[in-house]
Image (cartoon, rainbow, N blue to C red):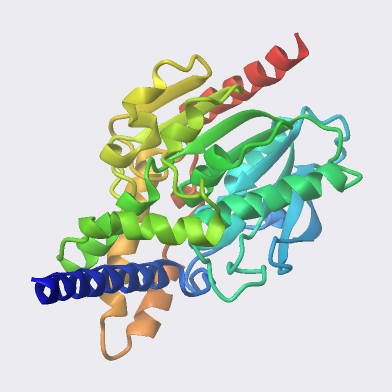
Amino acid sequence: MVLLLYLVSAILFLVLLFCLIFAWAVLRAAFGNRQEGSAYLNYFTAADFEDLAAEAVEFPNRRGETLRGNLYFESGRTDFRALLIFAHGMGGGHLSYTTELDFFAKQGFLVLAYDATGTMASDGKSLRGFGQSVSDLQSALAFAAQNEKTKARPVVLCGHSWGAYAVCHAQSPAVRGVVAFSAPEDAATLLCAQASAQTGAPFGALKPFLRLWERLRFGKTAAAQTSKVLRTANVPVLLLHGGKDAVVPLSNAAANAPNLSENPHIKRVIYPEKCHNVYNTLEAEAGVAEMLERFGVLSKQKDGGADALAAYAKTLDFRKLCEEDPTVMQTVEQFLEECLLDQQA
């Protein structure tokens, strides 16, 4: 009997150890490398927009690695409404959102946008995880509180996807409002769903192990569901999500979490026909989906794939692929205006 108990305990230990190691492998696959963007995409800079100025900034993350970005503002403007800190999604860093940064600058905001750890211009060997995006945003807030041009200004946050997770989870008394495009409700659920989609195998059993790794690496609250964090939010939060988002499905969207309805500070807008880039027009989203599908086909060509990709990229109109939905952006602008007015009252 004692031998049987030892045997069962040993088997259980091995199963748990295997799950823990497998969860680490999933995290490594998702976050274990740098993100340098794509050589075939056109990343707009301030020079591509009329009257958009940019000043280079850099600051350390909590590991001492240097994060780099810019302060964006309308040329000649000094009377900024507030400081808007923008947190980007995974992929091409903050330059993937220069159209949005230009919009906010033209609305009178001083915009701080940076590349997160392991991304584009910033240091770091890898993205590390969802918790790193939160940590980097907290580093940006600390920098903003000390920088001569940004300190003592009211602060609002805006983020997309990975960055939306960050703006929802980074608590700070300096923040007066939060805008989150396509924010996931649960990071572990998202990782398991993506792993299942890529391999066809079920990964749901790994969720508690993924959460354990997040807590070990980023602190005890790192793996909390977004709605759990937002339930006690005492500043206005705007959650915007697309009903056809395939990256962060509506079933795992913070904007669709039922337990947020009791917090009067939370405003949720779900656009039934939108996908992951909810701030873009439907035409722009369709164009991006077609582009990614075409990239996938061409990248699998054994001969001449790189040349075919480069040739195809030259036919793309990146302005149209980044075209903003004026209705969505007006909703965001009005929300931010109300945030700032409420704080002045």
Q: Position of residue 230 (x, y in %)?
A: 49, 30
Position of residue 189 measured from the top left corner of the image (x, y, whole percent): 30, 50
Q: Which residue is farthest right?
A: 148
- Residue extending furthest toward the top: 345
Q: Looking at the picture, does residue 198 appear above or below residue 228?
A: below
Residue ID at (53%, 48%): 163
Q: In which quarter of the image is the C terminus?
A: top right
Question: Is residue 321 rendered to the left or right of residue 252?
Answer: right
Spot the residue most to the front.
2
Q: In this view, does 154 lie above or below 290?
A: above
The reply, left or right, for residue 132 in relation to residue 313 is right
Quarter assignment of residue 120: bottom right
- Vertical comparison of 280 with 98: above or below: above
Identify the residue at horizontal 44%, vertical 38% (top origin): 226
Q: Which of 206 and 108 is in front in this view?
A: 206
Please report the residue visible at 59 percent of the width from the left and 46 percent of the height from the top: 99
**Which picture quadrant has residue 121?**
bottom right
Tell me: residue 254, above or below residue 287. Answer: above
Does the rendering let one see residue 70? yes
Asked if one can make out residue 96 in the rendered structure from this viewpoint, the answer is no
Q: Where is residue 244 in the image (x, y as percent from the top left)?
A: 27, 40
User: Which residue occupies the foreground of this view, 198 or 98?
Assistant: 198
Tally of numbered discs: 0
Give residue 212's position: percent from left, percent from top: 41, 58
Dividing the image into 4 quarters, which one contains the N terminus? bottom left
Say which residue appears at 26% left-offset and 68% top-offset: 16
Q: Is residue 78 left or right of residue 132?
A: right
Front-most of 338 and 228?
228
Q: In which quarter of the image is residue 218?
A: bottom right
